[in-house]
Amino acid sequence: MRLKRIAFVRKTVIYIVTVITSCCILFQFFVMLSTSLKPKAEVFHIPPYWIPHHIRFLNYIEMWKIAPLARYFLNSIIVASGATALAIGVAIPAAYALARLRFNGRRAFLYLVLITQMFSPIVIIIGLYRAMAVMGMLNTYQSLIITFAAFNQAFSVWLLTGYFQTIPLEIEEAALIDGCSRMQALRWILFPLSAPGIVATVIFVFIWAWNEFMIALTFTSTPEMRLLTVGLFRFMGRYEIEWHYLMGASLLATIPVLVLFLLIQRKLVQGLTAGAIK
Amino acid sequence: MTKEQKIAYLCLVPSLILMATVIFFPIGNTFLTAFYRVNPYGIRLKFWGLTNFTRLFSREEFWTSLNNTFIWTGGVVGFTIIWSLGLSLALNERFKGRSVARSILMLPWATSLIITALVWRWILNPEYGLLNHFLSQIGALRERVNWVAEWRTSFPMMIWIGILVSIPFTTTVFLAGLQSIPLQLYEAAKVEGAGSWQRFRYITMPLLKPVFTIAVLLNVIYVFNSFPIIWAVTGGDPADTTHIIITYLYKVAFFYNDFGVASAMAIIVFIILLSFSMVYTTIYYKGELY
Amino acid sequence: MKKRWILVALLMVVLLASGIALAKTKVHFVAARYHTGITDDYWAKVASEFEAANPDIDVVVDVIDWGTLHQKLTTMIGAGKPPELANIATIWLPEYISAGVAEPLDKYMTPEFKEQFIQSLFDITVIDGKLYGIPIAVSARAMFYLQDPLEKVGMAPPKNWEELLAVAKAIHNPPELYGFGIPCTTWEGEAYYAYFLWAAGGEFFDETGKFIVDSAEGIEAMQFLVDLVRKYKVTYPEPWAINRDEMQKVFAQGKIGMFITGPWQVEINEKENPDLRYGITLIPAHRRQVTMAVTDTLMMYKGAPNKDAAWKFVEFAYQDNYRLEFDVNEGMLPEKKVVGEKIIEDVPYLKTFIDLLPYGKFLPMHPNWEEITGEIVKQMQLAYMGEKSPKQAMEDCAREVNTRIIIGF
């Protein structure tokens, strides 16, 4: 009986926390959705309308004509995927070394990496632009991919190191004793068990690259190369902002990220129950 | 060098090269610039010692923004960590609607921060924005509030926005950590008669510690330098009272074209964050990381 | 074996082709966005028509929003890679000239080209006898007012300060209607001081270059504004918390009785509240009648490689048909005389603004104007908030700016 009551209280608390958080978050998105469906005359109506009096789906079609959104989407997908692949690909070995190997300079490397995070792109944007200009890489995918991957080393390395450390060393050592090579232990034990962590890092880097504004604005100069977040600013004129298009396009911009999340999130749960332990 | 050390250095090299080519040089440049007199475009003219720093310290706005930055960072990170911890524990349990909740949680993270900030500026407008409308409809607001008009209403509101956008990432990080804890540890504990709270205290908390500590550290560094929210919502106004360092830095660099002072500010930020990181990791790791 | 040769041949073709492509002269033009969906397409069209007529030149147009334009240009200049051409706010020109990055245009411009323009607009880009820019967008400001509230109280649109106060008092009825709108943020907040400073007969600088907002006229103007806000309370509240863009929306929704803004407000009203009944009149005078004329300038940067090709593009883009299209679509006043005559047929309401141009004053051209406006706006905000008297605010402002002028910003 008592166990059932505890379970009930538990479930209630869980629901309360989740629902309150969801409502707080959804407020902003409800506003975005509602505004994106309003005709221009209703966007600034005082007092504001919760739900548009005339729902205008046409907004979602018009926005594709005003700005080359398809191209922006494509560019962002290419750059974000490339940057994520590069960032993670380079960070995983580093994190493995930091979590599992003994060597001099562990602390130095960790701090060095962290330092890159302490300088906002705003501070070093001119130097970054100059570096890309010198390398002749302005207005290309490569400049963005490399730069984004570099800026995400700090997060990736620190996060992955942390996740690798969560996996008890004994499990791998048991496997090594049983005759596995280091690479095998890596592949069959460490990676599957830390899959949730790797997935979280992948999501983080992808989203960072997807939403980045300052560097993308500075490095690109033609509409063909613009990324989505910068491209959305096309809806900002000198005297006014086309809020209905801007909010609608922003909502659309979240879709690829959500799709990625839905695809990967099964791995997040699977990694644990896969039972790779025995 | 032992074989282990050789392998380790090999593992680190790619990451190092990537960061060196892209970031280290501009950072070095900023360091130099802070000690030089520069032209309006950041080109170094002549060595100036600490003059940029003294000029910086004589500006009242700098100290205001420094103070604000601590409040901002403490407020956002503090509440985010607590809320995310609770939320991640909740989402770690199986319940109906869990995947819906997880997807909703992703929304603020999936949206560009600068767009979120602009949307909130719209929402906060006292005439056509929906927040005041909503609050007056539910009776929570009796007289007209202009949120961005003064520090005591705008700053807490911006901290609230900061929390909302930080929760998704932090919760995901915690969740991944929670889910990496092998189930049998819990099962073994249950068999030995440990209750919920004990399982949490002796299994979850210690195993989550590396991830938790890193989440706090990265959040602090990230939030300290977070630009879009303050910039889009108040722009530092009224009268430069709501600036945090990074927004004031932007104003000085790109509105006043004073890259010497801006670089000096960047160095101050760096010193603060580095000190924090070193103190924090020393306290919390006490030899575990090293 | 055969495969390898084919590959090599292909490679050579590709290299050759890219070599030819690279041999095209590239002209970079950083343009500013005035209207969503209009400016971008306009420049794309002009650029592609130019390229069709000049196949060896490639024009790369980068249209940026005004919020980030200055920053992007600073980044490019700082990195040593400025664009050939840029569409800038004229008040930025002194900054570029004093940094030595602006290219004088005298040697490119023929007298016939220059003749086509309304000369007074040209003159403000002449500094130290050299011409640095061509006007690309011209606007003037006027006062918009709502007809219904004024008719209800039976008053005519105000012609001077006393009438402004009287009308504002009569129609002020919060929260439905606010008498007069004053936005005071870094987004052109200083303009709302300029309208009154100039009307009082004052100036920002005297002949010696001293900043004189603490003159009798300067304080009088500020006192009037602060009284409107704090003493008579006939304005939209908390001016420091609303920017001009937002106030334009609020005016369009019929919540502000009188508001000084530019010709684009007509379009905003049309799109967002077509039934709004409003009128346009002159800015209230005091000792003199003024308006603020604002131009944006097309300039060339010294450090860019392909300046001759860039000038070709300039001549092409300034043909009458393109300028007429630009001015009509963006709601701008004409900078060319011929265009001026045509435009009144297409856009009649612009006549009010064009008639105002003779009274037009420009904001001062000072290399540190951006920082000076920051200081002005800040002091204004403090005065509106009641933290300082208007006299104190203007004196502090003048002292601060004059000190910085001496010791350097």
Image (cartoon, grey):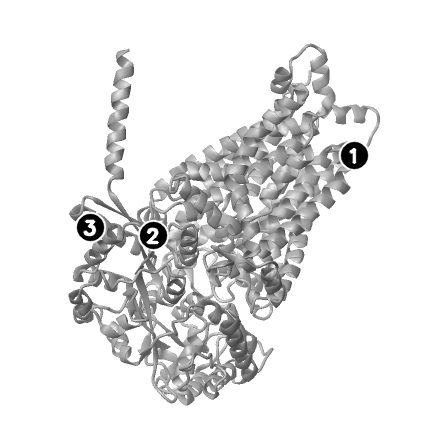
Q: Which residue is mark 2?
A: C83
Residue B98 found in image quarter: top right
Instruction: Provide residue A103's location: percent of width, then percent of height.
Output: 69, 27
Q: Say above or below: C390 vs B245.
A: below
Instruction: Provide residue A225's location: percent of width, then percent of height.
Output: 36, 42
Circle 2 chain: C
Residue C338 found in image quarter: bottom left
> Do residues under tags 1 and 2 come within 8 Å of each other at their CB atoms?
no
x 24%, y 61%: residue: C326
Question: Same subunit under labels 1 and 2?
Answer: no
Crowding at mark 2 (Cα within 10 Å: few <14, some 14-19, many 20+): many
Give the Cα separation between the discs numbered 2 and 3: 18 Å
Which of discs 1 and 2 lies nearer the camera? The answer is: 2
Residue nearest the observer in this picture, C262 or A118: A118
Q: Earlier in the sequence, mark 2 or mark 3?
A: 3
Q: Amino acid at mark 3?
A: Phe
Q: Secondary structure at mark 2?
A: loop
Which of discs 2 and 3 lies nearer the camera? The answer is: 2
Q: Amino acid at mark 1?
A: Ser
Say which mark, if any, is on residue B196: 1
* Residue B139 visible, this orientation: no
Question: Same subunit under labels 2 and 3?
Answer: yes
> Do residues under tags 2 and 3 come within 8 Å of each other at their CB atoms?
no
Looking at the rendered image, the quarter that the N terminus of chain B falls into is top right
x 68%, y 25%: residue: A100
* Residue C278 visible, this orientation: yes
Q: Which residue is mark 3?
A: C50
Which of discs 3 and 1 lies nearer the camera? The answer is: 3
Residue nearest the observer in this picture, C248 or B73: B73
Instruction: Provide residue C169's location: percent of width, then percent of height.
Output: 46, 85
Circle 3 chain: C
